[in-house]
Amino acid sequence: MLQAVSLSCRRGDRRLFSGVNVTVQPGTLLAVVGENGSGKTSFLRMLCNLLAPEEGAVLWHGVDIRRLKEQYYAQLTYIGHLNGIKDDLTATENLLLTAALTGDRPSEASVRDALEAVGLKHRIHHLPTRVLSQGQKRRVALARLWLSTHPLWLLDEPFTSLDQAATALVTERLRSHLQSGGLAVVVTHHEVALPSEMVQRLRLDG
Amino acid sequence: MSRPGLWETLRGIIWRDVLLAIRRRSDVAISVLFLVIVASLFPLGVGPEPAVLRTIAAGVLWVAALLACLLSLGRVFTADYLDGVLEQMLLIPQPLPVLVAGKVFAHWVVSGLPVVLLSPLLGLQFGLEGEALGMLVLSLLLGTPTLSMIGSIGAALVLGVRGSGLLVALLVLPLYVPVLIFGAGAVTSSMAGIGGEANLSLLGACLVLSVFFAPWATASALRIALE
């Protein structure tokens, strides 16, 4: 269970949000919505301890994540609005190296399956990612979700640059993750096509 | 799900950075070429008098190595910062200072080690011989990792700042002074026949101190840069 307790955020002179209280239960996706500049990304970064809140705390199973640190990081998969992939490595190398660093130990076959699951054909698995389109790079980044065994997923605008088919694939992956008891927090401008009992919404107004 | 072992993670970080350097060989070549050109300009400017060249050899080669290291500092974190890999690194379930130490070690392998390997050749250009050449290699072997460690603090502090190249030089160069003095001093003492062991010991002490403190300082600077 993930909890944000009285979370406040200030960037420079501007207060983005204050007193945000929300609890995400296993099997639930929290969709964070709001206008540009309302603090959605800052909120997500607070949830993964990349940004310190001005006030309040984030709790994972009742314990402050600032105390848990590495124990907490071992539970989460974070995909920010930057893809976090290296242009000079192939899609396969990117996934194998990133997964190894975060505690997943996928085989080359499972990496290939993950890339095919996001609709990337075999011939481009071994190309440097710099030759791929923005949408294809986003798919490489999101293929991590097919390799992740972590219960908590924190995703910043995962559907950006994706076509309808890829959006549907990612949504389906989110559904299976939630059905297996996982949690997800997704910052998005898109409607997440999941049953309403699975989705909880948090609107930040800036 | 399992938490990766510390050595496994370190190996992964080092291997990724070395692999990237292999893929982008031109970046490594630029630092090495810079070193060779700077070291070669001095004999052309000062003249071919062997006694003069031997006198200035230690200082010139050490300054050239120091500048080559400075030139490569931008590669330690900037690319990772821009493509989001640095964010991912901060969320790896291992102590961040240890991961930073791995990255700095990889930086030394691709930028400091070539300097060490090339130094005997450059030393010959200045008329260094036998023991002095050995001392030059030893001093660089102890000194260049220290330069990478100290440099990583500066590189992390200026992350995302406009004009960071110049700023990192201003931040880091004063901190390089003791390493330069001990490094060049080791070679000069060896040439004077009084042995460079004392200077090597001091370089070793600098290395131990930097390995112990620099990763913590760099990790803190990275966290601030990403907030």
Image (cartoon, coloured by chain):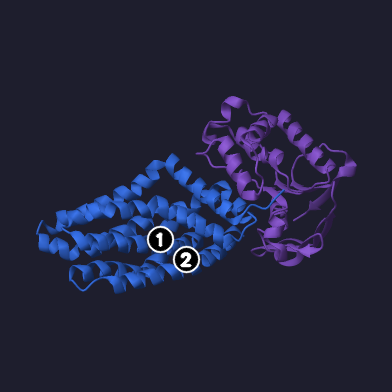
Chain colours: A purple, B blue
Whether residues under marks 2 and 1 lie with C-beta atoms below 8 angstroms apart, the answer is yes
Q: Name the quadrant of the C terminus of chain B.
A: bottom right
Residue bearing the label numbered 1: B145
SS of the residue under disc 1 = helix
Q: Is residue A114 left or right of residue B126?
A: right
Q: Estimate how packed mark 1 is, as few (under 14), some (14 to 19) or many (20 or more) residues with alpha carbons within 10 Å.
A: many
Q: Position of residue A148 (x, y in %)?
A: 71, 43
The chain containing the residue under callout 2 comes to B
Q: Residue furthest right?
A: A197
Q: CA distance from mark 2 to mark 1?
A: 9 Å
Residue hosting label 2: B211
Left or right, A165 with reference to A89? right
Instruction: Give whichever of A170, A103 is nearer the camera.
Output: A103
Report helix, strand or loop for mark 2.
helix
> Which residue is painted at 88% across and 38% down in the image?
A195
On the picture, is B113 further left or further right than A65?
left
Residue A51 percent location from the top left of the image: 66, 60
Give the amino acid type for the residue marked by disc 1 in the picture.
Answer: Pro
Residue A38, visible in the rendered structure: no
